[in-house]
Image (cartoon, helix red, strand yellow):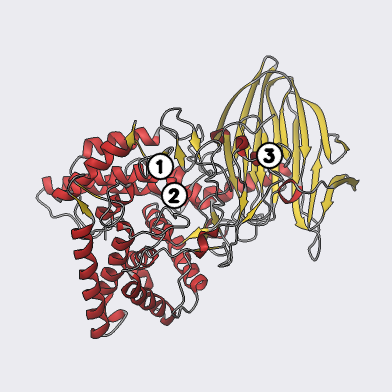
Amino acid sequence: MESGQISDHGFLADGSTSALVDRFGSVNWWCPGRFDAPSVFGRLLGDDAGHWSIRPEGEFSVRRRYLDDTLVLQTIFRTEHGEVALTDALAFEPGARAHNIGMRSPQVLVRSVQSLSGEVPMLMHYRPRFEYGRTTAFLVERNGTLEAAAGATRLTLRSNVRLRSGDGEANATFTARAGSVHNFTLGYAPTYDAPPPEVPDADQTIADTAAGWRSWTALHEYYGQYHDQVRRSALVVQGMTYRPSGAVVASATTSLPEKLGGDRNYDYRYVWVRDFSLTLRALWRSACYDEVQRQFAWLGRAMGRIGDERVPIMYGVEGERDLTEHRLDQLAGYRNSQPVMIGNDAWQQRQIDIFGEALDAAWLMRDALEPMDPEVRHLLRVLADQAVLDWRKPDAGMWEERGIQHHHVSSKVQCWVALDRAVRFGERLGGPQDVARWAAARDEVRALVLERGWNDRLQAYTGSLDGDDLDASVLVLPLVGFLRADDPRMRATIRAVEQGLSHDGLLRRWDGDPAGFLICSFWLVGCLAMGGERDRAHELFERLAGRVNDLGLFAEQIDPLTGEQLGNFPQAFSHIGLINAAGELTDVDADKALRERGMPPPHFTPTRS
C-alpha cells in the first residue's frame, strides 16, 4: 500500500520531532530524536523506507479527530463487524505540564486499539527501516519485547499482542472486542552511550500526554475572531517547535513536491530567519508570550557575534549553520517526485530581507526586551548596519531562486523595515550619528522602491526593480507598514495581483507557479481587510480556512484545479498565515467598532507596527 495523499496524514509531535499517520492507520514518517534526524519510518518518500500499520481486516470507513486541545490522534474504523478506535501519540516526559512539555521527551510512539462495538479482526504490520530506508535491522525477542538494532539506532517494541517476526519485520493478528484494549509502545534510543529505549505503559502515557497538551493550551487563550481555527493552528505551530531551543521548523518533512513529478523538492526541517517575525506575530496573536521570548533568545544564540560576514538566513534547530544538501537516490520520492533531499543549500544564499524580519520582531516585542541585554543590542545594531551596506545588492529573494539573483522589491522593503525599526529604537541601539545614518538609508530605500518598483503598464508594484512580472511577495508592503493598503498604487497592486495570480481564492507566487501558495493567499486577506474590503476579506479567509484536511492541517500549497495539498506537511508558514490573517481581521473590525463609537483606534496592535 502506498502512503496516499499528503493530506491523508495526521500530525503527532513531542517537542523534539514529529510523526505522520495516514487515515489507514499507517505511520509513514518518524525521525526520532529531532526533526531533521534520519527516519525509521519513511514510506512517505518510498515504499521500502519503512512503516508501521494497524488497521482492520477487509473493508472499512474512517473518521478522525484530535482529542480536544491536543495533538493526540484518534482514528475510528467502521467495518461490517463493528467499530474500533486507534489512538496515537508521541509521548511527553511523564508529568510534564505547561511550558515544560517537550523539554525532555522520551522518544516514545504509543498506539492503543480499543473496541467501540462488535468484534473487529485487526492486522498489525511493523516494518522499520533505518536511515531513510538504507538499513534493515535485526529483530530480536528479548525480555518480552521486540528489539530492532542496526547502526546508530535502537527501537524496542512492547505489546500485549503476540508478535510474529522475521526478515526485518513483524506481524500480528488480533480481535478487538468489548472490554479489550490492545497496546503497542515503541521506544527509540541511540545504540551507543545511552540507556535502552523506554517502553512505558501505553494507556497511562496517552492520558498523561493529552493532559500535557491541555495544560499548555489552557495558558494560551486567544480572544480574536476565528477562535477554533487559530487555536488549532497555534497547536500545530507549537508541535513544530523544538522545545529544547525554542526554534520553530518550517515543516515536519522533506522533499514533498510543489508539483507532482517535479524537482522543486526541498528539506524544510530547519529554521528560517525569514519566518521569524511572522512566527513571533502568530505566537503573540495566540497568546504564546513565553514562546516569543524563547524564540528571540534562540535567534541571538544562533547568530552569535556577527562581524562583516554574510548573515546566515537559516539554521538547524540547535543553531547549526552548515546544512549542505545530500541526495537520497535510494528513495523513489513521493509519487515518484525526485530528487529526495536532506539538507538545504539555501543556507548559503544572500537574502537581505532577513534584516527586516529580525528587527521587526524585536520592535514587536520591544517591551519584553527591556532592559535590553548588550548581546541583543549588538545583534540589532549589526543587522541595521548590514542593511545599510547591503540594501543596494541583488539577492535570491524570499522565494529562494537558485543560481540567479535579482533586485527584489520585497527584499528592499524589508531592508527599509530594518532601518525604520532601528530608527524607532533610537538611542536604545545607537547614538545620534547612527540613527541619522539609518534614517538616511531608510529614506533612500523608500524612494528607490517607489520610483523603480512601480510598473505603469501593469499598474502594480512588481517582483523586482524595473520588472515586468507580478509577484505576490509585494503584498507584504502594507503588512509591514511601508505603504497603506488604501494607498492608490497599493490598492491597484492588490487588485492586479489578485486578478493575475489568483484562481478560486488561491494565490500563486508568480505567473507559472504550479499551485496556490497558502501564506500568500492569507496575505491577500490582510491586504483586503486593511484596504477597507472587510466583507471580501472575511469571505476569502473562510474559503481558505475551509481547505484544511479533516484534522485542520495545511501543507505549503494547494493545487487550485484538484484541491490536492502539495509541498511539505504540515507547513508552519501556512498556519502562521492563518493566525495572522485572523488577527488582521480582528484588528480591522475592532477599529471600525471604535470609530463608530467615536473613539480613536489604538496606535499599536500585535500585528500592526
In the image, 176: left or right of 301?
Answer: right
Q: Which residue is outermost to the top?
A: 80
Q: Earlier in the sequence, mark 3 or mark 1?
A: 3
Residue type, label 2: Phe
Q: Which mark is residue 573?
A: 2
Cβ–Cβ under 8 Å for marks 3 and 1: no
**Dividing the image into 4 quarters, which one contains the N terminus?**
top right
Q: Is residue 462 visible?
A: yes
Count of residue discs: 3
Name the secondary structure under disc 2. Answer: helix
Kindly identify the residue that appears in the image at 67 percent across and 49 percent down: 328
Q: Where is mark 1, residue-wise?
A: 518
Whole-percent x and y of residue 364?
33, 64
**Dividing the image into 4 quarters, which one contains the C terminus?**
bottom left
- Residues at marks 2 and 3, CA–CA distance in whole angstroms: 26 Å
- Which of label 2 and label 3 is nearer to you? 3
Q: Where is mark 3, residue-wise?
A: 46
Residue type, label 3: Gly
Q: Residues within 10 Å of mark 3 (few under 14, many from 20)?
A: many
Residue type, label 1: Leu
> Quadrant of residue 503 in the image?
top left
- Residues at marks 2 and 1, CA–CA distance in whole angstroms: 8 Å
Kindly identify the residue that appears in the image at 43 percent across and 65 percent down: 350
Q: Is residue 258 above or below residue 424?
A: above
Q: Is residue 200 visible?
A: no
